[in-house]
Image (tube, rainbow, N blue to C red):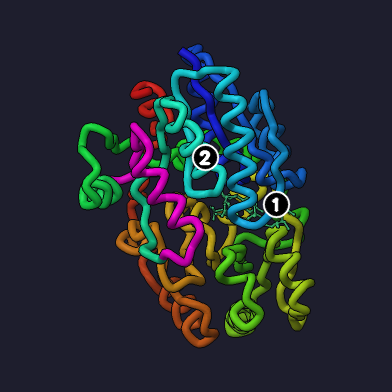
Amino acid sequence: MTLSIILGTRPEIIKMSPVIRECQRIGLDHFILHTGQHYSYNMDRVFFDELKLPYTKYNLEVGSGAQGEQTAKMMMGIEKVLMKEKPEAVLVQGDTNTVLAGVLAAVKLGIKTGHVEAGLRSYDRRMPEEINRVLADHCSDQLFAPTEKCKKTLLGEGIIEDRIHVTGNTIVDAVYQNRKLAKERNTLEELEITPGEYFLVTVHRQENVDDRVRFSKLLKGVEEVGKEFNIPVIYPIHPRSKKMMQELGIKTDGNIKFIDPVMFLDFLNLENGARLVLTDSGGVQEETCILGVPCVTLRDNTERPETLDAGSNLLSGIEPGKIIECAHRMLDGNKGWVNPFGDGKAAERIVKLI
Ligand code: UD1
Ligand code: UDP
């Protein structure tokens, strides 16, 4: 049987890497179809190189664009490849436009489809990701839910139990597989920062950075939290956020150290060494929970409530006073939480089920 693995963005490459490795290990015939949603070296190719993944058989080079335009171009390209290659199954991961395009193109051709990281919900339909998650879950044949909570959500939406498998999240596999390799790198030394003596920030969500008032307030909150604790703040800035800072003319007062996005191994080191992480990223909420690092999420909701239940994460929204309060609460709190996202064998289970 042939499996088509469809991906297109940074988190998909990282979270699919254990699945690709598992396919290689057991000799399952597969090929990677990259939509080209992400294309800058440090958002795309760097991860294939550092994680030693085979490069993609197809890259549609769709690039950036409006939601509908980007998704439609991907669907057209994916359909052509699937019609030519005729794989028995398609696998997608997460909640990006690549996922929606992949699932829609495949199911309409009658190809069995699996969705990795199924059953996550923010219940915020303003997020493009929420629409993508719901549609991907309802159209896919096999749903690989990271936790029992996600399974319950899917059952609550009327999805039949036979289609749902609780596997754990492949990000645990990716963290476990790369932790040791990361230790060999001098990430913190090169940035001249000391373990436990900095805060790490990532912000890139459309609803946070595309709005001038919201993004300015959020960055102000991040600056103030740095001042409150008298600690440097490092922000590997996503290209979307960098573009929006320029377009919207947003300036900061020099308290945040902006750096380019880094490779996964360096980012693991940055997370691991941070006293606190402030983020609106989905993957970063999970990784901090797995690594035992306190996290404050600069959003009003999360599709990862397991992190709130575990006690590794608090939702602050973007008001500076609330961000500072949450930072204090996380730093004063108990750090002995249990990782709810599985044992690092999610990819093995998923490939077996396929
Ligand atoms: C996308 C996903 C988001 C995910 C994020 C991971 C959707 C709707 N959004 O958001 O869920 O969390 O990826 O990082 O699918 N850009 C570059 N180089 C790149 C990629 C993007 O410069 O390689 C810039 C472009 O200016 C582009 C902007 O970033 O317009 C946004 O890119 P896009 O892929 O549309 O969305 P993301 O914000 O990356
Ligand atoms: N990441 C990275 N380098 C960076 C920032 C993040 O390798 O400079 C990794 C991080 O470890 C995580 C993933 O990118 O695995 C998260 O991606 P992102 O925040 O872009 O997307 P989301 O998870 O919100 O969809």
State which region is magenta.
125-147
Identify which residue is drawn at 24% across, 51% down: 157
- Residue 218: image quadrant is bottom right
Question: 13 or 258: which is nearer to us?
Answer: 13
Could you tell me how far apart the alpha carbons at marks 2 and 1 are, in whole angstroms? 21 Å
The residue indicated by pointer 1 is 64
For label 1, count other residues whose C-alpha is less than 10 Å away and answer few (under 14), some (14-19) or many (20+).
few
Residue type at the position of mark 2: Lys
Q: Identify the disc placed on residue 15.
A: 2
Instruction: Tell me where residue 300 appears, x and y as whole percent.
Output: 43, 73
Mark 1 near ligand 1 (CB under 8 Å)?
yes
Mark 2 is surrounded, within 10 Å at the Cα level, by few (under 14), some (14 to 19) or many (20 or more) other residues, namely: many
Residue shown at 34% from the left, 24% from the top? 353
**On screen, 349 above or below 24?**
below
Tag 1: amino acid: Ser
Place of residue 118 in the rendered image (x, y in percent of width and height, measured from the top left): 37, 44
Picture quadrant of ligand 1: bottom right
Horizontal placement of 63 versus 311: left or right? Answer: right
Any magenta on residue 261?
A: no
Q: Quadrant of the N terminus?
A: top left
Beta carbon at label 2 within 8 Å of ligand 2: yes
